[in-house]
Image (spheres, rainbow, N blue to C red):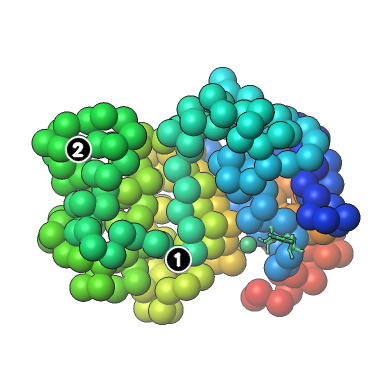
């Protein structure tokens, strides 16, 4: 459902993604791991249409992105951003809106849902992320873990075909990491397609079906998560995993 073909991304004269081809199946959870600067965030941002790129193609659920940014891809970008949800390391909720207010924002203003219908759905989503009791709380009244769960509910409110998460637990206090991983685990069990950049190797090994290792803008390892994490073949992966154990 997501296919990246020979993707090239350059900053100045430096290639940060150098000819990556990879496809992601519907209903599968893929972990993206690897050392800092390897290109993980850039890959996700290209797939979500947040970054222009200089070569290759990205196919997402029937839409195709080409190099050329907004000017060349306007229609595809508008469609694609409704189909792919993104969750960042820091959650960036609207500070002046409640949990429910944050979740209904895009369904009402982008999809044209009625406030009533969007609010009903928001209630279901809050229950799904274990936050029914926080529907009327403002971001500053919630912990980081709660805010990140609201951010996940907000992304799900657009009924995305895939959810891309970029280090969703990295900014959390250690005691809050588990509650966010639990939500992601439940979504995985429900068959949601997810691409997750993570340093949580236990999560990658137990929840993701497949693990990709990005290094220097290339995929140096790709296979079933258990194999990649327990028996990496590439020296760079061995060194990286050695550090995270
Ligand atoms: N806006 C930018 N301008 C210039 N270089 C960037 C920019 N964003 C990322 N990079 C560079 O691209 C490379 C890949 O970065 P990134 O995708 O953030 O890696 P990762 O998420 O794996 O840590 C890094 O070398 C980084 O410094
Ligand atoms: Mg990153």
Mark 2 lies on residue: 118
Q: Please state if 190 lies on the left or on the right of 67 as rendered.
A: left
Residue at left offset 34%, top offset 60%: 93
109 lies above or below 206: above
Dot 1 crowding, Cα within 10 Å, few <14, some 14–19, many 20+: some
Rendering quarter of residue 150: bottom left
Residue at left offset 80%, top offset 36%: 55
Task: Quadrant for the C terminus, please.
Answer: bottom right
The one nearer the camera, 235 or 115, is 115
Residue 118 visible in image? yes
Q: Please state if 204 lies on the left or on the right of 97 as rendered.
A: right
| Quadrant of the rendered image holding ligand 2 | bottom right
- The percent coordinates of residue 39 (x first, y second) are 72, 56
Mark 1 lies on residue: 90
The one nearer the camera, 106 or 182, is 106
Q: Please state if 225 lies on the left or on the right of 122 as rendered.
A: right
- Residue furthest to the top in view is 62
Task: Quadrant for the N terminus, please.
Answer: top right
Looking at the rendered structure, the secondary structure element under dot 2 is helix
- The percent coordinates of residue 236 (x first, y second) are 83, 65
- The percent coordinates of residue 117 (x first, y second) are 15, 33
């Amino acid at each position: 459902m997501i296919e990246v073909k020979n993707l090239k991304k350059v900053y100045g004269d430096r290639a940060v993604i150098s000819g990556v081809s990879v496809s992601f199946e519907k209903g599968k959870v893929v972990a993206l791991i690897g050392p800092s600067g390897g290109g993980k965030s850039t890959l996700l941002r290209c797939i979500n249409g947040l970054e222009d790129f200089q070569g290759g193609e990205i196919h997402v659920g029937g839409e195709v992105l080409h190099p050329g940014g907004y000017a060349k891809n306007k229609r595809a970008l508008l469609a694609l951003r409704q189909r792919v949800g993104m969750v960042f390391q820091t959650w960036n909720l609207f500070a002046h809106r409640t949990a429910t207010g944050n979740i209904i924002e895009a369904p009402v203003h982008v999809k044209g849902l009625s406030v009533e219908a969007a609010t009903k759905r928001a209630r279901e989503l809050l229950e799904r992320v274990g936050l029914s009791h926080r529907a009327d709380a403002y971001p500053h009244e919630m912990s980081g873990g709660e805010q990140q769960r609201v951010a996940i509910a907000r992304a799900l409110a657009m009924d995305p075909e895939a959810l891309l998460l970029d280090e969703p637990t990295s900014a959390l206090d250690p005691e809050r990491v588990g509650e966010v991983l639990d939500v992601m685990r439940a979504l995985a069990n429900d068959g949601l397609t997810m691409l997750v950049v993570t340093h949580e190797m236990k999560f990658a090994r137990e929840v993701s079906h497949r693990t990709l290792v990005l290094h220097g803008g290339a995929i140096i390892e790709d296979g079933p998560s258990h194999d990649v994490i327990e028996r990496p073949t590439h020296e760079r992966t061995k060194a990286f995993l050695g550090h995270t154990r």
